Image: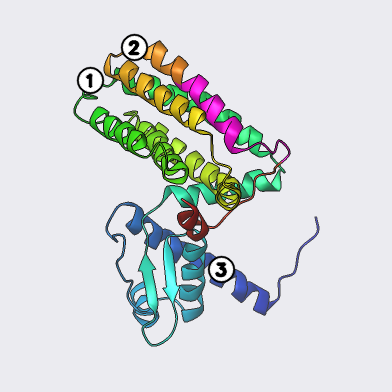
Amino acid sequence: MTTLGIGAEAHRRLSSRRTAEIVADELRQQIVCGKLADGDLLPGQKQLVEYFNVSLVSVREALRILETEGLVSVRRGNRGGAVVHAPAKSSAAYMLGLVLQSDSVPVTDLQTALRELEPSCAALAALRPDRATTLLPQLVESNQAMADNLNEPEKFSEIGREFHHLLALGCGNHTMVVVMGSLEALWISQEGEWFGRAKEENAFPTLAKRRSALNAHVKMTEAIADGEVERARRLAYKHIDDAHTHALPISDQRIQAHSPQAMSRRS
């Protein structure tokens, strides 16, 4: 059996990396469980060195790990420090986007996933016993806003996107909310290119298509209100298929991962 020789310097780097991962894991757990809240400022690096009894190199590497994960952002300069960020769907979407981009997955693949999952959100929403007081008022308000902006294509499209976001959030299943939130964030980051072109070329859906979309939203809302599970699912499937076909006409477009910061600017 061959024995691998590791030099002293390489061994120190490995040890430092392992220590950094331990420090990062401890800080990560405190962020996830809420001991460190969104927006909190971490203690300074020297304080972290003393608290964990590790080297400054390990602390800095730990912060780099967490920054890559989107759990902290490190500020440089006189007012430097590391700001805590609660786990976000946009971060999950970014990692998902990187995996799909590395496999050269087409946007149509993501489109299919959403087309299959979002109707399930509509069906779950129709099953919620508290839908009349939780979800439905928001959907009705969104529909009214769409009606009020029927002649404003850009605003109408933005409100329409929000309707789908509300539907996913209101399905009542937290796992589905997280999954759909991640997929939605990734979709919006891809759709953003179309949205930008549409603004430049005034290529938003025609008035007839906008009326059709509003009618679909109203019917979906009614089906959810009446607890008609399969009707809600069926209406959602048809509407989402129509909406995605208009939004992304380029069939060979590949998924591109965008950082959480870029996603927040696009959404």
C-alpha gap between disc 1 and disc 3:
50 Å
**In this view, 109 is above or below 229:** below
Callout 2: 10 Å neighbours few (<14), some, many (20+)? some
Residue bearing mark 1: 129
Which amino acid, by three-letter code, is at mark 1? Pro
Eye-nearest disc, 2 or 1:
2
Q: Position of residue 207 (x, y in %)?
A: 49, 32
The residue lying furthest to the bottom in this view is 78
Taking 141 as reference, is 84 left or right? right
Residue at 46% x, 15% y is 234
Q: Nearer the viewer, residue 212 or 24?
A: 212
Residue bearing mark 2: 228
Disc ID at residue 211: none
Q: Nearer the viewer, residue 63 or 136?
A: 136
C-alpha gap between disc 2 and disc 1:
12 Å
Question: What span is in magenta?
Answer: 236-252
Taking 51 as reference, is 10 left or right? right
The residue lying furthest to the left in this view is 133
Q: Position of residue 214 (x, y in %)?
A: 41, 28
User: Majority secondary structure of the magenta segment?
Assistant: helix
Of the residues under marks 1 and 3, which one precedes in the sequence?
Answer: 3
**Quarter of the picture holding the N terminus:** bottom right
C-alpha gap between disc 3 and disc 2:
55 Å
Looking at the picture, the colour scheme in use is rainbow
Q: Nearer the viewer, residue 197 or 165?
A: 197
Q: Nearer the viewer, residue 242 or 17?
A: 242
Residue bearing mark 3: 17
**In this view, 69 is above or below 245:** below
Residue at 77% x, 62% y is 3
Please check the rendered image and state whether residue 240 is part of the magenta-colored stretch, yes or no: yes
